[in-house]
Amino acid sequence: MRHLLLLAFACAAQAQGFDHAHGTWDALLGKHVVLLDGGKASQVDYQGMAKDRAALTQYLHALSRVGEREFEGWSRAEQVAFLINAYNAYTVEKILTRYPDIGSIWDFGKIFGNPFRDEFFSLLGRGMSLDGIEHGILRKRYREPRIHYAVNCASIGCPMLREEAYVAQRLERQLEEQAVRFLSDRTRNRWQDGRLEVSKIFDWYQEDFEPREQYFARYAGILGMPQGASPRLVFLDYDWALNDSRSSSPR
């Protein structure tokens, strides 16, 4: 019955034009995202998502019908929320094409079949990839480092998939909460023996967080770092195992 209700909700939203509340996606996340460690991390019930694949497909169709002209008429917050949700939803869809026979998103391939570079969907009237959303639009156009805490690459090392959709009215609060959640997760960011041990994200996207010393100082309390410290940065290994709620991979 819940599957039918989700699908009916998706169809109703479709009939009324684009839903900036992202109601179908919000319902899927609320149902299938499992919070861990007091909400600092999450895993995904991909088996449950697969059962609600029809509702996910309806949501993806709604995203793909938005043209560039319509998109440009939206507010900045509406645009950013749309792009983050699209990235996350299409990542889940990508995983489901092989689930349950997949242990990492890299199982698709790093050269041929690269899941981040493959234009496996259409968005804003053109073929699009996950990298196209993240690097071609989000990072390039909006210059918002907290985007890195919001897009989820279906991996344990990645900032968590949020348990609700991003929406324009709450976007600032949602992005800041994601930053706090990720930076307070001691499995991925921590002060230890005079070193600041942080996620590889801060190495890969160094330019987005410059000046990094000032950036980390802003969150010193959350990181457990003494005020005024000039830490030596150490980048932790990134866990690319699938963020599956049924996985035995340790946190």
Image (spheres, helix red, strand yellow):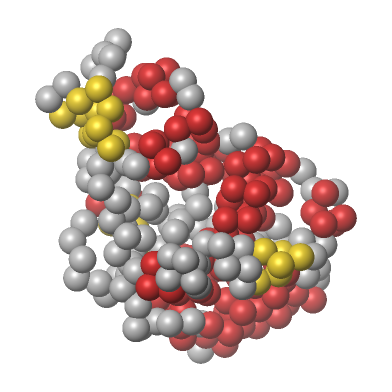
Judged from this view, the residue extending furthest toward the front is 111
From the top left corner, tell me how far across and down residue 106 is, in percent: 39, 67
Count of marks, rendered view: 0
Residue at 61% across, 79% down? 57
> Which quadrant of the view contains residue 179?
top left
Can residue 242 be seen here?
yes
Location of residue 32 in the rendering, given as x and y in whole percent from the top left corner: 42, 71
Quarter of the image with the C terminus in it? bottom left
Observer-nearest of 222 and 157: 157
Q: Is residue 133 left or right of residue 30?
A: right
Above-or-below relation of 56 to 105: below
- Vertical arrangement, residue 126 with respect to residue 39, above or below: below
The answer to whether one can see residue 26 in this image is no
- Where residue 100 sits, quadrant-wise, is bottom left
List the single residue furthest toward the top. 228
Q: Is residue 124 left or right of residue 178?
A: right
The spot of residue 150 in percent (x, y) is 49, 49
Relative image position of residue 175 (x, y in whole percent) = 51, 41
Q: Which quadrant of the figure has residue 121? A: bottom right
Along the line of sight, the residue nearer the viewer: 34 or 217: 217
| Residue most extreme to the left | 193
User: Is residue 88 left or right of 196 when viewed as pictured?
Assistant: right
Q: Residue at x 46, y 79 (%)?
A: 96
